[in-house]
Image (tube, helix red, strand yellow):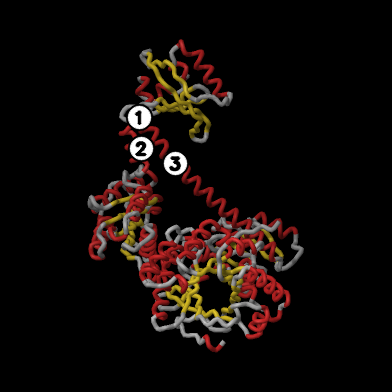
Amino acid sequence: MKFILRPESAINMLVIEKSLNDTERYASTLRNFGMPVHPTRVDNADALMEFLEDQDKELDLILYGNGSAGVELPQALALAGKKAPDIPVVIIIKNDQPDPKLISASMRQGACDIVPDGNREHLHMAVAREYTNLLGRRELATAKVKLRETEDRCTLLVESSRDAISYIHEGMYIHANQAYLDMFGYVDMEDLEGMPILDMIAPEDHKSFKEFLRSLDDGEDTNRSVSVHCRNSENKVFDAHLDFAPASIEGEPCTQIIIHDRSDSKELEQRLKQLSSQDALTGLANRDFLLEKLDGIMAQPENERQPYSMLYVLIDNLQEIRASAGITASDAFLKEFAGILQDQVSDTETLVRFGEHAFTILSEKANTKDTEALAERIRTGVDDHLYQSMDKMVQPTCSIGLSYLSPKTTDAQALINQSFNASEAAHKEGGNQISTYDASQALSQATEGKGSELQIKELIQYALEHDRFRLVYQPLVSLQGDSRENYQVMLRLLDNNEKEIFPEHFLSYADQAGLMASVDRWVIDHSVKQLLNHRSEKHKVNFFINISGAGLADEGLLLYICDCLRDNNAKGAWFTFQINEEDLRAHTQSARKLMEGLKKIGCLLAINRFGKLPKYETLLKHLPVDYVKMDPEFASGLATDQEKQDNLNSVTQVVQSYKKKVVAVGVEDANSLAVLWTIGVNYIQGYYLQEPSEQINFDFSSF
């Protein structure tokens, strides 16, 4: 069985290789297996050391190539083990039967696998396995941090609870909160620690209580609650209902006991809610509180939503402060730092401790002048403050990133991401300064290959809000005498120099960011308006428009299309909405519902990229499509490939038997055109006719 991995994001791969051609060959091998990679090549020890010491570089895997004479293998393994111990190293060697001593020595130094050069499948499996293991280790580390935070929060909740809570091990008390101590009349835990729980039970209930405890120890599936008579330190007896549950303290198993106090439960619920949305160290609101508030803002109607600004305040040198002053003093410093921020914000602004060394401020100040003034007051306040919490003077500074939430913004998370990127930019420029998120600059970095995945997703959001997309059109020409002017609508993203970015470079990011349905709506709206311009000039233009898998899941898309047609006095028959076969299979129910609705308003339908998946005939039986657009693979090299011609002929006959029209896509040459005409294909589309263009002026009469 083949080991298949298709990462959602590209693998950042450092290639230690003297040959540039070999580096590209390794990357191409992995890409051919469906693994996106971002390779960076180094060919000497100094370059390797510089890369590994750069903490801003993202790294997922090290590949030592067979031509790496500039860095000896033991030296490379030693540097990797010292500077990037968690990053897997895969070695490529020329010899198909490597020296066993080389294998043993390399494995001892940390190599994960040794792959003979040219064994493509071995390379793919090794990289896939090690990358999967790396992701697992990273997820485990994240889970451990979250577990520790959860345990700290639970401890805080237990200590502040009105319910009496204790923990026992082998019938002895090991911990109790203050409410439990107060209930039984003890001052502190020292008086209770090591005492048998049976001493707190009235003698007449000893027998039944022992039987209850025995049933818990035996693991019997019984009720874990018991009502007994308890007695306090003064031997006064009172009724109590005890709930038992398995628990652990510092990794050791124990049993939790809760005696519920139902008095003033509303106040308790409010307190619990406050604790869940509050940072335990500083007392400020936490990240969950901010996200909940932003969700509430985004739930408001667009015309009622007021603009906001976001300040992301990043402490430049917290690690240096921790190393110099210690954990306790640095925690005290964070409280003091939070106080400086509180002095600068108003009651209408939301101050949040967002991360370990980051704070955010959500402000109703939405103009640049007021927001920058607030940011400058905070920056100078931090820089000028004399900190009482640190014996050793390390002067803290901060970098502040600004971003703005417009009424058109559909994703509040983008506001946080943009302000974070701006603060990172300020920090990289030396810190102690303010930076405002610049979408055009980020777009330039992304299109030059320097932008992060997060930036590209934000740029798509920016393009939706500021019409930074462009529509281009490619004709579909009939081989059967149809005189209608059919065009496929295609999408391009524009960079800040008005250069076009092709869909294969950004649509996957739009899908990952949950923006694909919004992209579909943008295309539909602008396509309808563009077609109306040409229809007004007496051209019989019809558009083929893509709907993505996310669009199929958009329950409001049908109504949106109806509104677009009505508002522009357009007819449904002018538009053919096409859906990829793979998306139809993944969203069968929602696709059928949308298709039936589109048919009712007169629209035509097409299946796109058809014929490569098994049992394709089922779709033809059950879906009301008018056109079937073949996968472009059918047309590639068609004129010289008899097997491909036979396959296309077979699929075409099946499609046409269901009264559907066949469109061949990706037609590049006249020889293929002759084959398609012989097979009986209805329409053709491809660069042989015309490359995609902004102009809708193809001469259909020439065919």
Q: Tell me which label, 1 or 2, sits earlier in the chain.
A: 1
* Residue positioned most to the bottom: 702
For the C terminus, the image quarter is bottom right
| Residues packed near mark 2 inside 10 Å, few (<14), some (14 to 19) or many (20 plus) | some
**Which mark is nearer the camera, 3 or 1?**
1
Which residue has dot 1 on it? Answer: 162
124 vs 81, nearest the viewer: 124
Which residue has dot 2 on it? Answer: 272
| Residue 501, horizontal then vertical, whole percent | 47, 74
| Residue 189, horizontal then vertical, whole percent | 40, 25
Q: In whole angstroms, how far apart are the C-alphas of marks 3 and 1?
A: 20 Å
Give above or below for 105 relative to 237.
Answer: below
| Residue 159, horizontal then vertical, whole percent | 38, 32
Q: Tell me which label, 3 or 1, sits earlier in the chain.
A: 3
Q: In whole angstroms, how far apart are the C-alphas of marks 3 and 2?
A: 14 Å
| Residues packed near mark 1 inside 10 Å, few (<14), some (14 to 19) or many (20 plus) | many
